[in-house]
Image: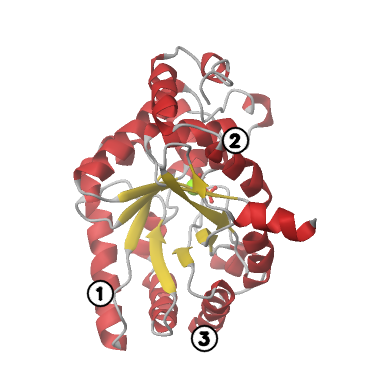
Amino acid sequence: QRAAQEAERSRPAVTTDGCSIAIGANINQPEQAPFALAQGGEGVGLMRTEFLFLERGDSPSEDEQFAIYRAMIDALDGRPLIVRALDIGGDKQVPHLDLPREENPFLGVRGARLLLRRPDLLDPQLRALYRAAKLGGDLSIMFPMITSASELITLRDRCDEIRVALDAPQVPIGIMIEVPAAAVQAQALAAHADFFSIGTNDLTQYALAIDRQNPELASEADSLHPAVLRLIAMTVEGARSHNRWVGVCGGIAGDPFGAALLVGLGVDELSMTPRDIPAVKARIRAADRTALATLAARALAAESAADVRALDGEGA
Ligand code: PEP
Ligand code: MG
């Protein structure tokens, strides 16, 4: 019975009309990989590296980081691994870094903005990652909180310098799309990024101007709000213009109806917390991609998140 369940979970997420969706897991530690794979994960679509800094009183050295990336690569045995560069700031505060207090941390020096100001954080991480890339495996690097192409270009240049110095192979370099400006300018960013992964948690917070941590507004911070869906549609369109793939690694990717809508909007990959994988895969396998595209068009034209959710069951 258990074997039958695992076999079912390992089946790919292909719609009834043959559209294949890559399914990744959001995990941070190599120890979580066996469970993620058993749930049907086909790789890691988001490895948040903040935990390396959050759970201790100091910053991990380059060697310590390398050991963890190597362990993750080993655990995945050739499957894709997307490691997100440090996303500190906003809700992810690291006391030992002694960063200046900000009035609005979510609008402050977080993610890529911090990496660009702190080579002492960026460089050891990139060195550890390129050393790991030399081991083989299928590694990609992803930068969080990109707002403008210039940030990405600077970060890519640094990646290149470090790669050349280490005589390491090239790896795909992608970005999170989680700032509305990045979604709107997706076409310009796609010229410089190898792939996109949409962070709907932050994209929703910034598009709707709702603090993602405010419990009072939790029900209104719905990633299926038509305004957020339009930003996602723009992101897909921008990615397509340069033949880039686009995934979603925010929480809505793990919601079966949300996942179906995202497939209808044209995303290629969904990455989620491992326990959500079986239900999302089952939903995609039961759906017709063309019907989902029609559903997505109706969702884009809806007036509210509630109206979008009311479409659940109609063609999905
Ligand atoms: C997101 O913003 O949707 C995301 C996946 O990143 P995080 O939740 O780590 O900010
Ligand atoms: Mg985010």
| Distance in Å between CA atoms under marks 2 and 3 | 39 Å
**Three-letter residue code for mark 3:** Asp
Local packing at callout 2 (Cα closer than 10 Å; few below 14, some 14-19, many 20+) is many
Query: In what element is the residue under mark 1?
Result: helix
Image coords of residue 118 (percent x, y): 39, 67
Q: Mark 3 Cα within 10 Å, few/some/many (few <14, many 20+)?
A: some
Of label 1 and label 2, which has the lower sequence position? 1
Q: Nearer the viewer, residue 56 or 51?
A: 51
Image quadrant occupied by the N terminus: bottom right
Mark 3, residue position:
63
Placement of 43 over or under 144, stated as above or below: below
Q: Mark 2 points at which residue?
A: 256
Of mark 2 and mark 3, the one earlier in the sequence is 3
Look at mark 1 in the image and give the residue it sits on: 160
Q: In this view, does 122 lie above or below 275?
A: below
Classify residue 94 by image quadrant.
bottom right
Indicate which label's residue lies in the foreground, 2 or 3. Answer: 2
In the image, residue 217 lies at what x, y percent?
A: 62, 25
Marks 1 and 2, how far apart at CA: 39 Å
Q: How many numbered marks does the figure carry?
A: 3
- Callouts 3 and 1 close, C-beta under 8 Å: no
Tell whether circle 3 marks a residue whose Cβ is less than 8 angstroms from ligand 1.
Answer: no
Can residue 39 be seen?
A: no
The amino acid type of the residue labelled 1 equals Asp
Residue in view at x 56 percent, y 74 percent:
72
Which percent across, then down, holds residue 130? 38, 79
Image height check: is 161 above or below 25?
below
Amino acid on which the number 2 mark rests in the picture = Pro
Could you give the CA–CA distance between mark 3 and mark 1, rounded to whole angstroms? 20 Å
Q: Left or right: 227 with respect to 71?
A: left
Q: Front-most of 140 and 51?
A: 140
